[in-house]
Amino acid sequence: MLQREQEMESLPTGLNKNWIDPLPEADGRTLAANMRGTGIAPQDLPEWKKHVIGGKKSSFGKKTNLSLLEQRQSLPIYKLRDELTKAISDNQILIVIGETGSGKTTQITQYVCECGLAARGRVA
C-alpha cells in the first residue's frame, strides 16, 4: 500500500497546463480566433462546392409532412416487423439483408426495444 502511494506521488502532475515555449517565434503564432473570416468568401466558392457545403439552405434527409409513425410505417421493413421480432426471439443469431434506406439499422432496434427484448438483457 505504501509503495502504491509513493508511485502515485512520483507521477508528474499538471500535464493539462498550457505549455509555454521558452523560445517563441514572434511571427510564428497566430490565434485561431484572429484567423476567423480570413478564408474564401462564400461568393468566391465554385457552384459545386456551395452545393456540397449547403450554406444556410442545407438539409439532411427527405422533407416530409408525414408524422414519425407514418414515416416508420412507410419503410419497407415495417411490413416484416412481426416476422422480424419473432425471428429475433427464436434465434441466437440473425442476419438481416436489405436495401439502403430500408430501415435495417434504425427500425429493427426500435422493434427490439418495443417488444421488450432489450429490457430482459437478451439483446444488448
Image (spheres, rainbow, N blue to C red):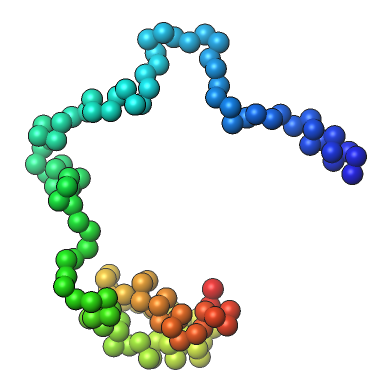
Left or right of 16? Residue 31 is: left
Q: Quadrant of residue 95?
A: bottom left
**Residue at 16% from the left image edge and 70% from the top image edge:** 64
**Residue at 40% from the left image edge and 16% from the top image edge:** 29
Q: Quadrant of the C terminus?
A: bottom right
Q: How many marks?
A: 0
Vertical placement of residue 24 versus 63, above or below: above
Q: Quadrant of residue 87?
A: bottom left
Q: Is residue 103 visible?
A: yes
How far across and how far down the image is residue 114, in percent? 43, 83
Q: Quadrant of residue 4?
A: top right
Vertical placement of residue 25 versus 16, above or below: above
Question: Which is nearer the eye, 99 or 61?
Answer: 61
Left or right of 18? Residue 108 is: left
**Residue at 42% from the left image edge and 76% from the top image edge:** 109
Left or right of 72? Residue 86 is: right
Q: Is residue 76 visible?
A: no
How far across and how far down the image is residue 73, in percent? 26, 83
Vertical placement of residue 53 versus 122, above or below: above
Q: Quadrant of the N terminus?
A: top right
**Residue at 40% from the left image edge and 82% from the top image edge:** 111
